Amino acid sequence: MNDDRSKTMLIVLGLIVLVAVAAAAVSDNGKPKPVKPDCPLCVPLHEAPPPAGTVRGVVMDLPPQLRQENWGGGSCVHASTVSVLRWQGQNEMADWWRQQYIGGEYADRLVQRMEAAGLRFAYTMDGDFEFLKWCQRTRRGAGIFYKPAHAINMVGMDSQYVYLLDNNYTDRPEQQGWEAVPINEFVSRWRGYGGFAWTVVYSPTPPEPVASKR
Amino acid sequence: MKNVRTITALASLLAAAGLVVMGVLEQLHVDEPQTQTPAVVTAEPVPPIQERVINLPEDGGAWYSSLVVPEFSTRKNDPTARRVEAMFATNPRLVSLLAQTHFRRYWPSEPMWQSKGWAEKYGIHAGDTAYILQMPASDNGYAKVAFKLTNDFPDTGDLAADGNTLADMIQRAIDDCCPRPRPQPEPSPAPQPVPDQTPNTIPDTKPNETPPNDEQQNLVGLLVTLAALAGGGAFYKFKQTG
């Protein structure tokens, strides 16, 4: 009788062990282990103060050295194009464009020249403000016909203003702050100047880094 | 008593058989070949003439990948830099990661890298090879760094050990640092100004995985039930004989 009870107990214990092993094998079937709360690879960076001239809403934040100044007494369209190219990492094309073109430009010929250069580009010729909003959303910036017989860059916008970079005054952000125009006024003027805006479609420069808060 | 022994013996046999079957299934799962087709990342493709972009990409929520390499003059003789660049060009998961992000390469004299002073901000020295993954910019215009790894990072070993190892490290950093979007409540009245609804496209380096085999789950359930029945029957008889 006692032998029967012992054997029965052993069998029951063996079953329990088998079930436990089977459950463990299935539950740990190649799934990743939970990560530790702290992330050793999220290297903390020092919290840098905002760079001089940084304004919320400015996304095409070219450093002063890379803002293309107007040249030849009237190459504003090309200067705006060069700035956009540099912002989106097309440095070689920017340098080539700077050397290749000089003087005045108009919308149709600019489009032809961008096509001939094999660029990926987008534009509006009828003052479609949604296009500029897309440029802002995707942090690409744009060149625009703005001010009399002039072309500059749209570098950002927020709920109230559109921010501009004029290639005749590239250090204005450091001197006086970004040129800001109320949105309704900007749209009205821009359309009055023809409503032409263009950009290239490549990868924009990354934003300024900040440490991951842990 | 004979019935109890028969039942328990049968349950034990079934449990053992189930373990063998599960072991075989697990091996089949591990050995399944990767189905993701690798794509080689090249430099910016040369676009054809007349490539005006009609369908504007809504990639404002994309993350940013930056691969930092030494100057060309030293890079060609730097085994770490060459190996890391090769990994990002050939490992399917890393290729996929770059394709999901805005990808840029930098070196010490690259104009934007130099002008922005990022070498100092990131603590990356000339001659280092590094990979940086950033989230999209927040409202203040800054972007959190989700992952940064250089070849001289002290605690993580060799940056260029293995493409899949690096992809695993990046994926853990993504999962740990950056929670995926969750369903948002719809407050009434709507907040003003309307918050930015640009989707945050969190990249993913996970390889294609076969969905969990439901049959395995059912088998475990069956084994547990059988074992419970056998154990219960044995215990009942045990109490009776006792």
Image: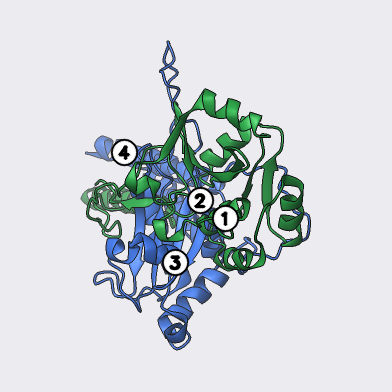
Chain colours: A green, B blue
Point 58% across, 63% down: residue? A94
Q: Label 2 neighbourhood size at 10 Å, few (<14), some (14-19), many (20+)? A: many
Q: Chain of mark 1?
A: A
Tell me where residue B54 sits by quadrant: top right
Tell me, yes or no, whether dots 4 and 2 are on the same chain.
no
The numbered dot on residue B111 is 3
Tell me, yes or no, whether dots 2 and 1 are on the same chain.
yes
| Residue on which the image places disc 1 | A79
Mark 2–mark 1 CB contact (< 8 Å): yes
Mark 1–mark 3 CB contact (< 8 Å): no
Front position among marks 1 and 4 = 1
Q: Label 1 neighbourhood size at 10 Å, few (<14), some (14-19), many (20+)? A: many
Secondary structure under the numbered disc 2 in the rendered image: loop
Q: Residue furthest front?
A: A73
Q: Chain of mark 3?
A: B
Residue type at numbered disc 2: Asn
Alpha carbon distance from label 3 to label 4: 84 Å
Alpha carbon distance from label 2 to label 1: 7 Å
Of pointers 2 and 1, the one earlier in the residue sequence: 1
Q: Position of residue A158 (x, y in %)?
A: 44, 31
| Residue on which the image places disc 2 | A167
Front position among marks 1 and 3 = 1
